[in-house]
Amino acid sequence: MRFRPCIDIHNGKVKQIVGGSLRESSRSAAEQEHAAGIVSMAAENFVSEKDASWYADFYRERNLKGGHVILLNPAGTAAYEPTLAQAKRALAAWPGGLQIGGGITAENAASFLEAGASHVIVTSYVFREGKIDRKRLETLVREVGKEHLVLDLSCRKWQGLEYRVVTDRWQTFTEETITPELLKELAASCAEFLVHAADVEGKAAGIEEGLIDILARSTDIPVTYAGGIGSLEDIRKIRDAGCGKLDFTVGSALDLFGGRLPLEEVLQEVRGWI
């Protein structure tokens, strides 16, 4: 079980947001058909004055590998370019130390690896029109190799019954349910899974224990859980429910992002289990 750091970038700033609050809207009716007119909005927990490369250096100095950089603006919108610039600064600050996700396709995936990412993280490109697009998944594997591919299976509760994969920055439900069968199938095509529990993401008010149970018994490849962690007790629950197999990310609750949970205490807790 490892702590995985994160750098979430929205509108050109490193932020922590409430995951389910992310929305896009046009500035005016006249701009409805123009991507450049789309504005991305979210409930913000924290907006950093430091840029993404500062966080990458911070993680590199502590040898916290395998963290993820997430671009929260859609490609083609006005805010995407400053968000992309921040992400590339982070990759340049720690080549090979960070993964990257957000708008990754077969066409641009290799360019992010060339920019310094260890892995690319993909959801919407593979989960298309509500289902897994296996041809696209095969294309991605050919382009970058499964060893450089992380599938983001971020999910939300569907009608209170099951966890379904969500796309488009956690706004759109797919028909794909997180099950042991799905995870075992997809594990043949990727190196890792990243799973945000989007309903609790950014709230630091408790984890999705039902989801953790599914993840822990479903696959032998690395899985990183994110969402709702607000205390050391939450991290211990992940350790126990996940049998020590799951890695985890802490965002809004961390003192690094204005929260109350000291990073050093988190690291000491994990070191105590090794």
Image: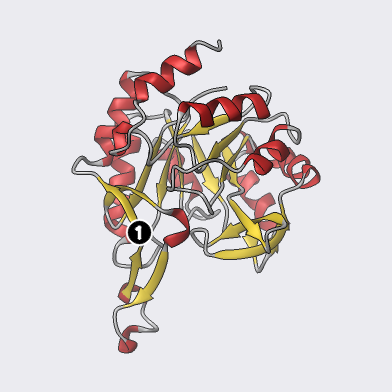
Which one is nearer the viewer's eye here, 222 or 134?
222
The spot of residue 119 in percent (x, y) is 51, 37
| Furthest residue in direction right, as rendered | 181
Determine whether, in the image, residue 254 is placed left or right of residue 245.
left
Which one is nearer the viewer's eye here, 189 or 207?
207
Q: How crowded is mark 1: few (under 14 residues within 10 Å), some or many (20 or more)?
A: some
Determine whether, in the image, residue 11 is placed left or right of residue 143.
left
Per the image, the residue denoted by label 1 is: 43
Tell me what residue is drawn at x 55 percent, y 50 percent: 122
Q: In which quarter of the image is residue 32?
A: bottom left
What coloring was used for the rendering? Answer: secondary structure
| Furthest residue in direction bottom, as rendered | 30
The spot of residue 169 in percent (x, y) is 48, 59
Tell me what residue is drawn at x 76 percent, y 47 percent: 179
Q: How many labels does the image show?
A: 1
Tell me what residue is drawn at x 67 percent, y 61 percent: 158
Which one is nearer the viewer's eye here, 273 or 220?
273
| Furthest residue in direction left, as rendered | 49
- Above-or-below relation of 57 to 175: above
Q: In which quarter of the image is the C terminus?
A: top right
Q: In which quarter of the image is residue 76?
A: bottom left
Q: In which quarter of the image is the N terminus?
A: top right
Tell me what residue is drawn at x 40 percent, y 70 percent: 24
The spot of residue 100 in percent (x, y) is 45, 42
Tag 1, which secondary structure?
A: loop
The spot of residue 44 in percent (x, y) is 32, 54
Going by the numbered disc 1, the residue's amino acid type is: Ala
